[in-house]
Image (cartoon, grey):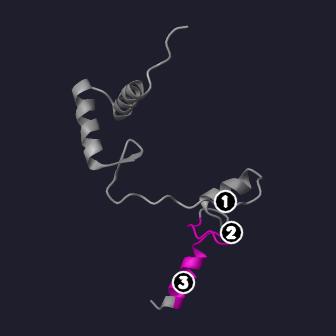
Amino acid sequence: MDKSKQRRDEDENSCAFEGCGRRRYARELCQSHHRQKREGRELQPIRPYRRRSPDTRKFAGLRLTPHCIEQLRREGEREGLSQGATISRVLEAWFRRKRPPPRGR
C-alpha cells in the first residue's frame, strides 16, 4: 500500500477533534470526545496516554513488575485470597509500617 493511501486510511479512522488522533468510536469521535459531547460539555483535548514501563505486566488492573506479581500470587495462594484482597492486605500492612494509625485521644 502506498504511504499516501495508508495515511488517508489512518485519517479516516481517527477522531475528528483537531489533533486528537485516537481511533474513532462513534459519530466520528473517539470514545473520550464522544462522552464529552454526549454529556453536553465543550470538547476539550484529552490528556495523552501514559507510557507503559516495558518491564511490567497487567495484574488485577494494575501494571506491576513480574517479581511483584509473583510475590502477590504466592501471598494470595498462601492466604486463600483473591488478587484484589491480596493487594488490599499488602497495601494496608505497608501503610501501617510507614505511618502508624493515630492513637486514641
Q: Where is residue 30 in the image (x, y as percent from the top left)?
A: 61, 63
21 or 1: nearer the viewer: 21
Examine the structure image and report whether residue 12 is included in the region drawn in magenta: yes
Q: Which amino acid does label 2 sit on?
A: Phe
Q: Residue 104 vs residue 59: left or right?
A: right
The C terminus lies in which quarter of the figure?
top right
Q: Where is residue 89 in the image (x, y as percent from the top left)?
A: 36, 27
Give the residue number, with chain letter if any, for mark 3: 7
Do residues under tags 3 and 2 come within 8 Å of each other at their CB atoms?
A: no
Give the residue number, with chain letter if any, for mark 2: 17
For the record, the magenta segment spans: 4-24
Do residues under tags 2 and 1 come within 8 Å of each other at their CB atoms?
A: yes
Q: Which mark is residue 60?
A: none
- C-alpha gap between disc 3 and disc 2: 17 Å
Q: What residue type is labelled 1?
A: His
Examine the structure image and report whether residue 64 is included in the region drawn in magenta: no
54 or 33: nearer the viewer: 54
